[in-house]
Image (cartoon, helix red, strand yellow):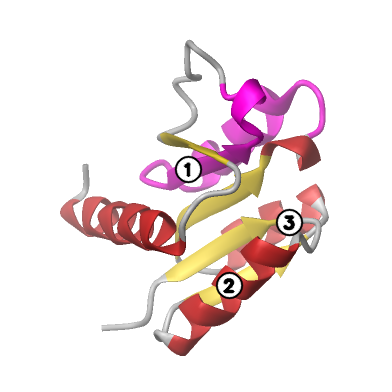
Amino acid sequence: MNPPVVVVLTDGEANLAHYMDLLRRQGIRVLATSRTYETILFMARHPVTCFVARAALLPGPPEDLLRQVRDLRPRLFVILASPPDEVPERPSPLVDLHLAEPFRYSTLLEALEYGEERAHAGI
């Protein structure tokens, strides 16, 4: 089986950068970018199963980018990370999991494992 592919939209935030290194050491293929257009290119060119984005980097309205990635990868597991006071009370149907920053590596890893299982199960 090929290693899972995760796209991360990040601005180089230290914790997330460290977590991406840990994911790579575990055999997960991490494609990181700070540009939304590269996110779409990665989705089109690679068998991506999970997408992690820092909410601050989503252009307005953020639903546009989220719809684009969902159109390319309908079974994609989408994780949105934001400061605790910005986690919405009513989550978007385009987002599978909201993480309040800072979050633990184990939480991210569990979410990615779940997303990978869901993608392979065709849910």
Q: Which residue is mark 3?
A: 10
Question: Mark 3 or 2 closer to N-term?
Answer: 3
* C-beta proximity under 8 Å, tags 3 and 2: yes
Disc 2 on helix, strand or loop? Answer: helix
Question: How far apart are the two marked residues, 1 and 3, measured between alpha carbons?
Answer: 14 Å
Q: Amino acid at mark 1?
A: Val
Query: Which residue is found at the position 51% from the left and 79% from the top?
Result: 22
* Three-letter amino acid code at the position of disc 3: Thr
Say what amino acid the circle numbered 2 marks. Answer: Met
Residue that carries the numbered disc 1 in the rendered image:
78
Q: Measuring from the top left, give residue 87's x and y in whole percent.
A: 57, 24
Label 1 close to label 2 by CB (< 8 Å): no
One can see residue 44 in this view: no
Q: Relative to the observer, which residue lies in front, 107 or 43?
A: 107
For the question of whether residue 9 can be seen, the reply is: yes
Q: Quadrant of residue 66?
A: top right
